[in-house]
Amino acid sequence: MHESLFIGKNVISLETVDSTNDYAKQLLSAQKPTDGTLIIAKAQTKGRGQLGNQWQTESGKNLTVSYILYPNFLSPDKQFYLNMAVALGIREFCESICTAHVQIKWPNDILINGKKVCGVLIENALQGSKIQHSIIGIGININQTQFDTTLTHATSVALENNNQTLDIENLAGKLSTYLEKYYLQLRLLHFNFLEKAYTTSLWRYNQTSEFTKSGTAFKGEITGVTKEGKLEIDVKGKPQKFGFKEIEFVY
């Protein structure tokens, strides 16, 4: 693939950091880093996932990065399209380095063979009717083969690739290229394209699946996602919409 135009061109490389997203925040409070700035760390001591969950990663074995972007062309009601573009870029990147089938678990986990290989944390700062800046934190399990026993659905590219290890150094540039491919579609406001690509990449799309809401199990079929990012599920012939963390998938 060709090199990216601006995403990942300015690189800040760190040995150890509490969290690349927190580092990006501090950077933004002090200056205005270049659009597409990439912060990469060999080790994160306090990597964060969605809703304050901790992202556990083994030092030097995985890709732990944050990007700083300025999607001020997006109105706040369209911010989920940024989520779509990021998830699609990561999915295609993972598929390029892994022989297995890669899917997106709503809203933005990346799965290989139904197991989580990547977590994403997007933090948008809004100013008036515009998105002032976005910090996109990405943790991809690359060469790690041992996981905490509580993480029953965790995997890595190595585990899905017959334990073949990859050179982490070269992967950030490749990831940047795939992210930029979809970010440029976003910048061109190709919302329908992103929506279609995202929906058809969804794990369990158009399949009867089991979910729980407030501890109660129900079955339904994922039919799509609203522009606000709510998951559309057909439950007994009735279309319903669910917000993030309102429901859980049953494996």
Image (cartoon, rainbow, N blue to C red):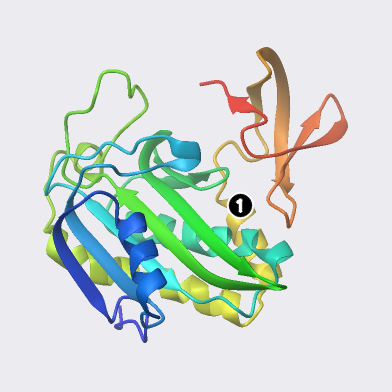
Q: In the rendered image, which quarter is residue 13 located in? A: bottom left
Residue at 45% from the left image edge and 51% from the top image edge: 121
* 217 lies left or right of 163: right
Residue identified by numbered label 1: 200
Q: Amino acid at mark 1?
A: Thr
Residue at 66% from the left image edge and 78% from the top image edge: 189
Q: Secondary structure at mark 1?
A: helix
228 w.r.t. 221: above or below: below
Residue 205 visible from this viewpoint:
yes
Query: Which residue of the protein is positioned furthest toward the bottom in this rendering?
Result: 5
CA neighbours of label 1 inside 10 A, class few (<14), some (14 to 19), many (20+):
some
Q: In the rendered image, which quarter is residue 161 located in? A: top left
Residue 177 visible from this viewpoint:
no
* 228 lies left or right of 23: right
* 152 lies left or right of 157: right
Q: Nearer the viewer, residue 197 or 188?
A: 188
Quick one: quadrant of the N terminus? bottom left
Residue 138 picture location, percent across and down: 36, 54
Residue at 75% from the left image edge and 52% from the top image edge: 226
Q: Nearer the viewer, residue 72 or 201?
A: 72
